[in-house]
Image (tube, helix red, strand yellow):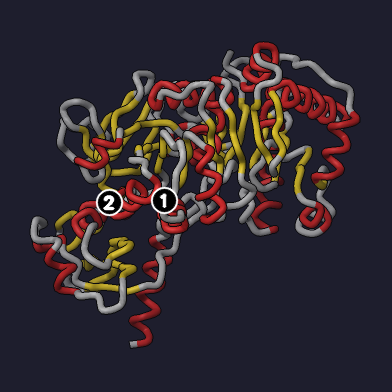
Amino acid sequence: MDRCDEWIEWHACDEPEGIAWEDAGVAWSWDALAEEVEGARGALDLLGVCAGDRVALWLPNGRAHVVLLAACAGLGAVAVFLNTRASAPEARAQLEHVEAKVCVTTAERASGALGGLAGALDASRWGALVEGASRRRATRHGSLDAPALILFTSGTTGRPRGATLSHRNLATSARQFVRGLGLTSRDVNYAAAPLFHAAGLGCFTLPLLLVGGRTVSAPRFDPAASAVALTGATCAFMVPSMWRAVALAAPVGWGGALRVGLSGGAPLPMATRDLVARRLGVDLHVGYGMTETSPSATLAAPAEVAARAGFVGRPDPEMSCRITGPGGAPLPAGAVGEVQLRGPNVTLGYWRDEEATGELLQPDGWLRTGDLGALDASGGLTLSGRLEDMIITGGENVYPAEVERGLAGAPGLHEVAVFGTPHPRWGEAVTAAVVCDDGWDLERLRSHLSALSRYKHPTRWLRMERLPRGGSGKVLRGELSSAWRARRSRG
């Protein structure tokens, strides 16, 4: 069974009264979820959706995401999930790019941001269509390698692109998380991370749909509410900043059954790892992946996370990982170069963007991640940052992640991001943006870098109230550069 609608049908037959989803305080059994999928399939049929058509969803977290994904799978249509933070022009551009036949969204957006756009439906009208439509069984269309889902990348470095994921991509990634994290039908996932992101959807939500576990969705992230909800969960994915916020919001004596906490989307600061362990009683796993890998790539166990800064684990047996140099030749263990991945969960490419797809995927199937890292002798991966973020100062290469790890744990330091700024003599200067307590001591920060060569030490410092981050938790380094230029212009 490699289509998500088949998973729902299976569990509806095997355990019809078992709880599949909790949404806005209402529990949905597997039987009820399967019936809603059939109703959604019938509604799409009434709207003229055929195999290959794109159907978009622009709503907060909820079961609507898996219902629409499963309904589309049974028709051979392609689901498209839009970022709820997207502006009206961004959303319209993405819908026009994929030529969506239908877009389900809020009443406000249907009449406002998407006003006049053919196929825009408010959620209440969609719900009425689903409830009143004839229940339609699945009609299989195409192969497992046919498009199933389009997710737009975060676009921190340019225009968002529609990563196209097949049924095989999604199923492979789900199996990898099940194996790597030991997930079972007894697990309960708390879905606070956005389901329009590959990690929010793919790390636990789809894997538990596969094995018959339960998901509890939060329409939006609230640290205090999440701390309460997590007491009833056994697993959850969040980016580091979310884990930190929840840990700080958790009351003294917080008690829960959280078994697997997974962090990803951005490097996990050791201070955040320690805070979560102390306040929530769970040692975090770390995952590395991206939208283009559906999103599984590597997993690191808590003990490895604690022992090796920057270590993100080993790939699943179905995945291959290599490190390449500037010319594309594979590098030996220990050498830093571009991380490349290959496996059955690697994207089909970017929707109707052959140029970008050609830059991403090589003819032999290897995906260029744009990330820098090194493999050890056992195949374990340690990341060093982004290829485009590498700083060249005086002809020497400096990897921001290495400097950030060196500063991690400094007293009073909460967040740090290292980037390059123009320098008339050295080309670039190593610059550190820091979020820290009042009374911060620059010399104490510098003392934490004694193990690094002097040319890697920041020579410029920028204190900020918070680091700018995108929706997936990644630091927006372009905004850091703008903040530095603004400060210099002020003198």
Kind of residue sitting beneath label 1 = Gly
At which x and y percent is residue 175? 47, 21
**What quarter of the picture does the N terminus occupy?**
top right
Q: Percent from the top left, x then y, of residue 286?
A: 35, 39
Which quadrant: the C terminus? bottom left
x then y, percent, for residue 129? 87, 35
Find out whether the residues at labels 2 and 1 contact each other: C-beta distance under 8 Å.
no
* x and y, in percent, of residue 97 in the image: 67, 44
Residue 120 makes an appearance in the image: no
Dot 2 crowding, Cα within 10 Å, few <14, some 14–19, many 20+: some
Residue at 41% from the left image edge and 34% from the top image edge: 260
**Can you see residue 368?**
yes
Q: For the residues marked 2 and 1, what is the alpha-carbon distance in whole angstroms? A: 22 Å
* Disc 1 target residue: 253
Which callout, 2 or 1, points at the residue further toward the start of the chain? Answer: 1
From this view, report whether residue 284 is shown above or below residue 21: below
**For this view, does 471 lie left or right of residue 130?**
left
Task: Tell me the kind of residue under disc 2.
Answer: Met
Callout 2: SS: helix
Tally of marks: 2
- What is the quadrant of residue 142 in the picture? top right
Judging depth in this view, the residue of 198 and 182 nearest the camera is 182
Q: Residue at x 27, y 34 (%)?
A: 328
Q: Quadrant of residue 416?
A: bottom left
Question: In the rendered view, would you say 240 is above or below 14?
Answer: below
Q: Relative to residue 232, is residue 76 drawn left or right?
A: right
Q: Which residue is located at x 14 percent, y 62 percent? A: 448
Q: Which residue is mark 2?
A: 270
In the rendered view, does 307 fall on the left or right side of 253? left
Q: Residue at x 38, y 61 (%)?
A: 477
Quick one: SS at disc 1?
loop
Mark 1, other Cα within 10 Å: few <14 / some 14–19 / many ≥20: few
